[in-house]
Amino acid sequence: MGIGGKVALTAVGLVLAVSAVVAVRTATFEAPAQADPAAARLAPARPVDVAKAAEHLAEAIRFQTISHQNRADDQPAEWDKLHAWLQTTYPQAHKAMTREVVAGHGLVYTWTGSNPALAPIVLMAHQDVVPVTPGSEGQWTHPPFAGVVADGKVWGRGAIDDKGSLVTIFEALESVAAGGFKPVRTVIIVSGHDEEVRGEGAQAAAALLKSRNIKAQFVLDEGMAVVADHPVTNEPAAIIGVAEKGYATLKVTAPAVGGHSSAPPKDGGGVVTLSKAVQAIHDNPFPMKFQGPGADMLKAISPHASPVVKVFAANTWLFSSLLVKVTAKSPAGAAMLHTTIAPTMLKGSPKENVLPQDATAWINYRIAPGDSSDKVMAKAKEAVGDLPVELAFEGHRNEPSAVSSTTSDAWKTLAGLAADESQAPVVPGLVTAGTDSRYMGGVSSDVYRFQPLVLTVDGTKVIHGTDEHISLDNVERMVRFYQRLVETAGSR
């Protein structure tokens, strides 16, 4: 046999060997984070008065607990009214729990269990909402703070984010308290008042719990949901966030001499220098990697996807680069796989015929698990090189959260209930935005982010957008989910 024949034979042997490995790994692949409702031993559902719950949510929407970027524009009296309304509307829940106020308007409720040796559970939902974009009010089907129930939906700012959670949690608590439920495990409710801006309420609540040496079995906050048309399967999937990205904003300043625009400097001045720096930072992205919660989501859903997806998920050693390429086709998919870089704000001269004495840009980063704000700064410095710019972080920074377990008893309970309620596969995911739960890492090692409502990918656009609303079916789902969760986890 000639050299060519031997090379061909070797190549065929390699292909067969690789194919055999792929086949074996696919056949023996066990998807992570699978849910088992039967093993979770879930509490039965109680009847839900959907009409009453919907009307209560509509009433809560009418309190304009808006967190403005300029906190001087906030109306503290609206939070006071909301607090009084909660106490009046849910008397049995308030009778069962102790209530504490932190950081002005943050709320911490404690329903003490009969066995103090058991780690508590913590449920979270914030009180504040984002402003309505000025001038867009006329585009709403119903006024954003009218709190209207119509066409099978509750309309208004906060219907989903996050008064939908706040109200349905209290509906569930009122129901189980009125029904005579007595928890064995302590149940704690944390409701921050400023999640949309600084999260001082949640930080104060976390500090209070830490001061009492509380280590919770798990924390559950907003973040993910049941996606009715998951991009991989085009079928429903319940995505539970097991981690969330960190947050940092980098301020890039290009000092300049300034002067009259009729005699610009040869180098173009501060604006040109700044544009070069911003472009350099943007063009030096963090590499995408098929690892972490974003990758685990695809692995977990692969048994419910096409055979090709399962082959890829079972053999990431061979197909990781292809998986990255496919996942990164959408901005949301790409965000799951790396730290993102988003230039968002610019400042130059106050007048068009004046050269600025400094030009400034702000670049927002969402930091993936495994990266850090120190890595962000180092990478930015590397990118700008010897360009005469100054780099500094602006405002608060949050490092990425730890990744919560998908094998713990807490996960098994939560995932089992999510699967039972949604009748859909349950998969872990990475929250690319920020939630109040980012401050709870010292309270529990298992911090999850999930709202038990069903939304299409397109339907998520109403969150922070025009015509925010929630269906009555989702109101019912959420009340029932929280009721069963409290009775399941609280009775163990």
Image (cartoon, rainbow, N blue to C red):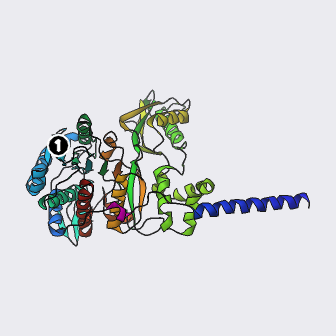
Residue at the spot x=77%, y=62% of the render? Answer: 12
Looking at the image, which is closer to me, 367 or 425? 425
Q: Position of residue 346 (x, y in %)?
A: 40, 40
Q: Position of residue 474 (x, y in %)?
A: 27, 66
Looking at the image, which is closer to me, 444 or 293? 444
Q: Position of residue 241 (x, y in %)?
A: 38, 53
Q: Give the vertical position of 229 relative to 435 (above or below).
A: below
Q: Is residue 476 left or right of residue 83?
A: right
Q: How many marks?
A: 1
- Examine the structure image and report whether residue 32 is included in the region drawn in magenta: yes
Give the SS element for disc 1: loop
Viewport quadrant of the C terminus: bottom left
Outermost bottom residue: 151
**Residue 486 visible from this viewpoint:** yes
What range of the chain is rendered magenta?
31-44
Outermost top residue: 257
Q: Give the vertical position of 423 relative to 283 (above or below).
A: below
Residue at the spot x=19%, y=38% of the render? Answer: 103
Residue placed under numbered mark 1 in the picture: 105
Q: Give the vertical position of 306 relative to 263 (above or below).
A: below
Residue at the spot x=10%, y=56% of the render? Answer: 92
Under mark 1, the amino acid is His
- Snapshot quadrant of residue 482: bottom left
